């Protein structure tokens, strides 16, 4: 059999373990139960030394013989089954396809195994944490939503990609950038600039900022997807490049930065492989409007949600540094937020020609 | 609300047993007038009296008149049978009477011929004319004894009504025994003299060995539904399961309501009135009518619980000579005597004069007539109001029958689409059926003490929804019976029971006990249902989990073994065998619920009544009955033979579930053939049970 010849992956073994939990429990007449690490703020700790958000030890039991959990338990096994199928076929797929693959009507009933994708997505995260397997290892990919340009040569499926020769569009970062799939052949840049928005990335790419300042320009069009974060991390680890983050000056921007730097609460278990604790916050800072003389009328009034979110950030352990407290409080007291786009008020190329060069020269960033 | 209007102390009851004379009205009157007026009344023609009092006598409109005539005849038939210790076998026949030309359909007709036949003791020849053609002639007026007749205005009034509206005489056939001849009479009332006119009398051949048949042609209207003849007969059978009733409807249908209880109610004893129970008018009349020569002798002899010693004492307190002539005690003196009597401490009246229906019989009647899943009955011990002993009995039939319940469950298995709503039956209200001395009360529900007590009961305590000041909601029939030598009605039309604290209290206590049992039943069933649905959930998901595990294990899993292990655990974790038991799946009875029946799709548990086999003679007597039905009845009774001795003990014994189910099955079979049991609420829709929990 061909299957026999194939080497069983670690992840596959972990997935089969899900079935073993059921079988063993039934054997011993115990209620089959998964212990799933709790994914919430209350179960994460911030390791200051490592600069990482780490998952705590608290676990929640998901038992089959509990009316409230029976269905979720069944769905978890179903999703594990679908993921194992991916491993065996050596295919990657999307969250949505996993949902469709696992959806059917339960025998002798009018009930669906899954009603919406909202039910299956968290189960995949549950399996990621429970089995300590990254989503990439589970062969589940996100949308390709990132771009990169710069003095960087990659090998993707045997194709050599020189990111300096792809015009202003750059290379579309795949969602899985693990070494098995993507090899970083060469990189001569001095640093990585991770830009929140596509608009600014386009501006910088068009202005060949990466050439004038010898850097890799990365964007994730909003909250950077896992592929972009992972690529930045690899460049940081493997090529020892400092990573600078450029986001809007609003609570969401701070949050994006914090996820890049120390990981997210939801997927804290991945911080180890995804987070870049040494990443720096380049801007937009709440000090910038004054420093760069942005007129008040290009600011946007903070809404209630912004204020609440900012106050929440003030409480996070990883925002306790004095500079950060000042940063956030300054935004709150000004009552205004600023988009990166607002810099165009001064000049279309203000970002490329004035703002960033000045910031880099002054080493004006937050840690 | 009801509390404030309830009567305290000693109000005047609306009517008295001894004063159904034309002149007597509900209004208070000066003491002497009753006697005087009694004398004057003789001059008024009976037709005038009748026309004036139509509304009090139950002839206010053609529909009600038809019912009243049927009721008078049926009540008499049952009273006569019971008094003679005969299990009643009554045939009621309604025919559309053609008034020249072809008969119209029943719903359009305005004239009906009512024929009621019984297997009672019959009536001696000489008595027939006055009974049927002389107003206010009867054997039940002047005695204090529990009987249906007390409520009636007499069969002669029905005959009078027929005579006035159609001009037709009343026809009677009666026979007192197989060796006596049957007599046929055609009689009318001489409306001037209130005397019978005999139009025809002869001896005839009659197939029945004994009994009475009366035929009256009346103006009427036949309409089904509330307060109809049909409803009256159905309700009669519920409270009188010892009766076999054959009903030939004006639409040509034959409905046989079989007997399910084979004991003639114990004949109630006649008692003398208790001093607390009489009013001044009654006292005056008794003073005139007594055979005693001395006042003390009158008091001791004509009342219950008055000893000669106590009689002397009353006389002394009232300032009267014990030797006074009763006839001379009039006016103020009589009033003094009355007041003295009422303030003297007198022992409560005896209660052995009452003949309650009994829990077993009520259960039989409800089970027979109403489709349901749960039945229970409670007879309270005797109590006393105003010197009158009475007994309250209550019963409940709950649910829509096992077939309907199963259907509902199936319906509910289909998941609802978005925007679809489960059928609710929250607006469906309970039905209250009221009885006084075994006679259904069909009018003036909201004025009745029974109805008020039902409203005042907090049904929510028993797992039944109830809006404020409303009847409880749900597929439920509430049965309440008051048995008394003297039932206090709110008015002379005798359709609602007056509220007395003692009566209200007794009804409430009986209803609460029924409610508690219902609550226990509902809670237990709910718990079992939820265990069942939990088990269903697990069973459903076990398949999925095992299939997935098998694929994860590369198809090398002993699937059947894992499934079995998981199913076993599911059973254990959902109440195990107990759930089956509570749901009646393995034949255990309604433990801890006395005088109750639980019906499930798989059988009947509890004190299951049986269809009583007919002796062949009675079958012949009613001739037009359905022989097939009778055969079925006999078969069912045979099947029930084993359970006959102690059905309850047997129902409780374990390990006999199978036999019991078979028996129940046969009973059910008999039921199906004999009748079409009406559901408590035919329009009832499924009560929306909670959707199966998800995730
Ligand atoms: N079907 C019958 N069989 C035997 N006796 C009857 C029957 N119908 C009436 N009677 C007798 O005639 C009497 C008068 O009946 P009725 O006028 O209805 O007054 P009530 O029923 O109030 O006594 C009854 O008390 C009973 O003795
Ligand atoms: Mg009568």
Image (cartoon, coloured by chain):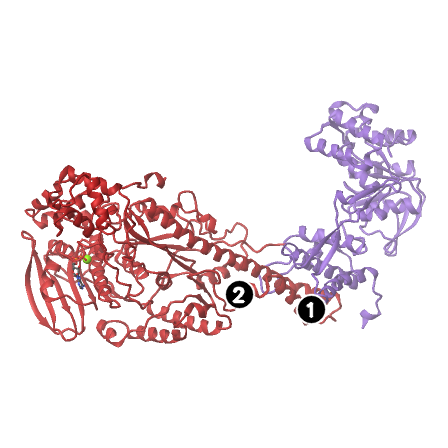
* Residue drawn where x is 92% and y is 47% of the image: A238
Q: Quadrant of ligand 2?
A: bottom left
| B216 w.r.t. A175: above or below | below
Disc 2 crowd, CA 10 A, few/some/many (<14, 14-19, 20+): some
Q: Is residue B588 left or right of residue B85?
A: right
Chain in purple, by letter, is A
Residue B32 falls left or right of residue A25: left
Pick the residue in front: A78 or B91: B91
Report if residue A218 is visible in the image: no
Location of residue B73 in the rendering, given as x and y in whole percent from the top left corner:
20, 60
Give the position of the N terminus of chain A as an image quadrant.
bottom right
Classify residue B242 as left or right of residue B112.
right
Could you tell me which quadrant the C terminus of chain A lies in? top right
Quadrant housing residue A166 = top right
Q: Colour of chain B?
A: red
The answer to whether marks 1 and 2 mark residues whose Cβ atoms lie closer than 8 Å is no
Q: Position of residue B397 (x, y in %)?
A: 40, 58
In 3D space, how far apart are the residues under numbered discs 1 and 2 (Cα atoms)?
A: 27 Å
Q: Mark 1 sits on what residue?
A: B562
Q: Who is closer to the viewer here, A225 or A76?
A: A76
Which one is in front in this view, the residue at disc 1 or the one at disc 2?
Answer: 2
Where residue B267 appears, as percent x and y from the top left, is: 26, 62
- Label 2 belongs to which residue? B581
Give the chain of mark 2.
B
Q: Is mark 1 within 8 Å of ligand 1?
A: no
Q: Nearer the viewer, residue A62 or A331?
A: A62
Q: Secondary structure at mark 2?
A: helix
Nearer to us in this view, A298 or A290? A290
State the image quarter where residue B530 is shown: bottom right
């Amino acid at each position: 059999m061909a299957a026999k010849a194939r080497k069983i992956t670690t992840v596959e073994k972990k997935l089969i373990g899900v079935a073993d939990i059921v079988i063993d429990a039934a054997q011993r007449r115990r209620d089959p139960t998964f212990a799933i690490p709790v994914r919430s703020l209350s179960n994460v700790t911030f390791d200051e030394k490592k600069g990482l958000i780490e998952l705590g030890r608290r676990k929640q039991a998901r038992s089959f013989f509990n009316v409230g959990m029976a269905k979720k338990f069944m769905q978890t096994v179903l999703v594990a089954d679908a993921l194992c199928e991916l491993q065996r076929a050596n295919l990657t797929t999307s969250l949505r396809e996993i949902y469709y693959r696992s959806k059917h009507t339960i025998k002798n009933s009018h009930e669906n195994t899954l009603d919406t994708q909202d039910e299956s997505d968290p189960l995949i995260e549950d399996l990621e944490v429970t089995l300590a397997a990254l989503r990439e290892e589970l062969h589940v990919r996100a949308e390709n939503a990132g771009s990169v340009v710069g003095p960087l040569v990659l090998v993707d499926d045997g194709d050599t990609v020189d990111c300096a020769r792809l015009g202003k569009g750059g290379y579309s970062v795949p969602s899985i950038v693990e070494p098995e799939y993507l090899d970083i052949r060469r990189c001569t840049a001095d640093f990585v600039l991770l830009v929140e928005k596509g608009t600014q990335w386009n501006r910088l790419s068009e202005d060949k900022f990466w050439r004038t300042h010898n850097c890799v320009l990365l964007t994730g069009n909003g909250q950077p997807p896992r592929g972009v974060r992972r690529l930045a991390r690899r460049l940081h680890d493997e090529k020892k490049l400092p990573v600078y983050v450029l986001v809007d000056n609003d609570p969401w921007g701070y949050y994006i930065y914090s996820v890049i730097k120390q990981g997210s609460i939801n997927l804290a278990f991945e911080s180890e492989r995804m987070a870049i604790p040494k990443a720096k916050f380049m801007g937009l800072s709440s000090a910038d409007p004054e420093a760069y003389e942005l007129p008040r009328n290009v600011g946007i009034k903070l809404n209630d949600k912004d204020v609440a979110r900012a106050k929440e950030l003030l409480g996070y352990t990883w925002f306790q540094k004095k500079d950060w407290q000042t940063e956030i409080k300054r935004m709150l007291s000004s009552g205004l937020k600023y988009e990166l786009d607002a810099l165009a008020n001064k000049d279309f190329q203000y970002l490329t020609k004035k703002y960033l060069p000045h910031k880099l020269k002054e080493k004006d960033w937050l840690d | 609300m009801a509390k404030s209007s309830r009567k305290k102390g000693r109000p005047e009851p609306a009517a008295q047993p001894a004063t159904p004379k034309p002149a007597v009205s509900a209004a208070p009157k000066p003491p002497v007038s009753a006697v005087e007026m009694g004398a004057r009344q003789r001059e008024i023609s009976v037709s005038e009296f009748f026309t004036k009092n139509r509304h009090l006598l139950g002839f206010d409109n053609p529909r009600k008149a038809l019912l009243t005539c049927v009721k008078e005849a049926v009540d008499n038939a049952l009273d006569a049978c019971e008094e003679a210790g005969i299990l009643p076998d009554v045939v009621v026949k309604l025919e559309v009477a053609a008034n020249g030309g072809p008969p119209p359909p029943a719903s359009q007709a305005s004239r009906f011929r009512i024929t009621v036949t019984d297997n009672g003791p019959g009536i001696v020849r000489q008595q027939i004319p006055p009974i049927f053609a002389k107003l206010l002639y009867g054997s039940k007026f002047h005695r204090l004894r529990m009987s249906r007749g007390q409520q009636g205005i007499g069969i002669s009034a029905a005959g009078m009504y027929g005579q006035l509206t159609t001009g037709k005489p009343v026809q009677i056939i009666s026979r007192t025994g197989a060796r006596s001849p049957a007599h046929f009479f055609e009689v009318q009332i001489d409306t001037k003299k209130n005397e019978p006119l005999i139009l025809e009398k002869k001896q005839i051949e009659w197939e029945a060995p004994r009994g009475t048949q009366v035929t009256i042609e009346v103006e009427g209207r036949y309409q089904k539904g509330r307060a109809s003849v049909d409803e009256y007969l159905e309700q009669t059978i519920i409270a009188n399961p010892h009766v076999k009733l054959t009903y030939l409807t004006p639409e040509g249908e034959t409905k046989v309501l079989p007997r399910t209880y084979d004991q003639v109610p114990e004949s109630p004893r006649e008692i003398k009135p208790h001093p607390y129970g009489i009013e001044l008018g009654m006292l005056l009349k008794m003073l005139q009518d007594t055979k005693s020569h001395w006042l003390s002798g009158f008091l001791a002899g004509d009342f219950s619980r008055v000893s000669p010693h106590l009689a002397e004492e009353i006389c002394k307190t009232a300032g009267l000579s014990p030797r006074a002539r009763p006839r001379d005690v009039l006016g103020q003196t009589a009033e003094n005597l009355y007041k003295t009597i009422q303030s003297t401490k007198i022992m409560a009246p005896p209660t052995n004069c009452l003949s309650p229906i009994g829990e077993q019989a009520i259960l039989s009647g409800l089970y027979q007539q109403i489709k349901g899943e749960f039945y229970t009955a409670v007879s309270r011990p005797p109590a006393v109001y105003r010197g009158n002993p009475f007994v309250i009995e209550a019963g409940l039939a709950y649910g829509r029958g096992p077939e309907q319940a199963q259907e509902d469950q199936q319906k509910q298995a289909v998941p609802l689409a978005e925007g679809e709503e489960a059928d609710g039956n929250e607006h469906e209200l309970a039905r209250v059926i009221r009885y006084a001395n075994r006679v259904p009360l069909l009018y003036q529900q909201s004025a009745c003490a029974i109805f008020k007590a039902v409203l005042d009961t907090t049904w929510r305590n028993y797992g039944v929804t109830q809006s404020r000041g409303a009847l409880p909601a749900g597929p439920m029939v509430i049965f309440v019976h008051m048995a008394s030598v003297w039932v206090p009605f709110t008015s002379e039309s005798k359709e609602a029971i007056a509220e007395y604290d003692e009566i209200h209290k007794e009804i409430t206590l009986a209803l609460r006990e029924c409610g508690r049992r219902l609550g226990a039943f509902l809670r237990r069933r709910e718990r079992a249902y939820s265990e069942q649905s939990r088990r269903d959930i697990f069973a459903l998901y076990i398949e999925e989990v095992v299939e997935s595990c098998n694929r994860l294990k590369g198809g090398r899993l002993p699937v059947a073994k894992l499934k079995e292990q998981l199913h076993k655990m599911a059973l254990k974790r959902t109440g195990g065998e107990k759930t089956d038991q509570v749901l009646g799946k393995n034949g255990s009875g309604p433990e801890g619920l006395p005088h109750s029946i639980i019906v499930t799709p798989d059988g009947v548990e509890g004190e299951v009544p049986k269809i009583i086999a007919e002796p062949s003679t009675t079958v012949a007597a009613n001739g037009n009955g359905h022989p097939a039905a009778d055969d079925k009845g006999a078969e069912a009774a045979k099947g029930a033979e084993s359970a006959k001795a102690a059905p309850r003990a047997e129902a409780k014994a374990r390990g006999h579930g199978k036999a019991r189910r078979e028996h129940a099955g046969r009973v059910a079979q008999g039921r199906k053939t004999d009748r079409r049991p009406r559901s408590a609420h035919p329009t009832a829709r499924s009560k929306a049970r909670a959707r199966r929990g998800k995730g």
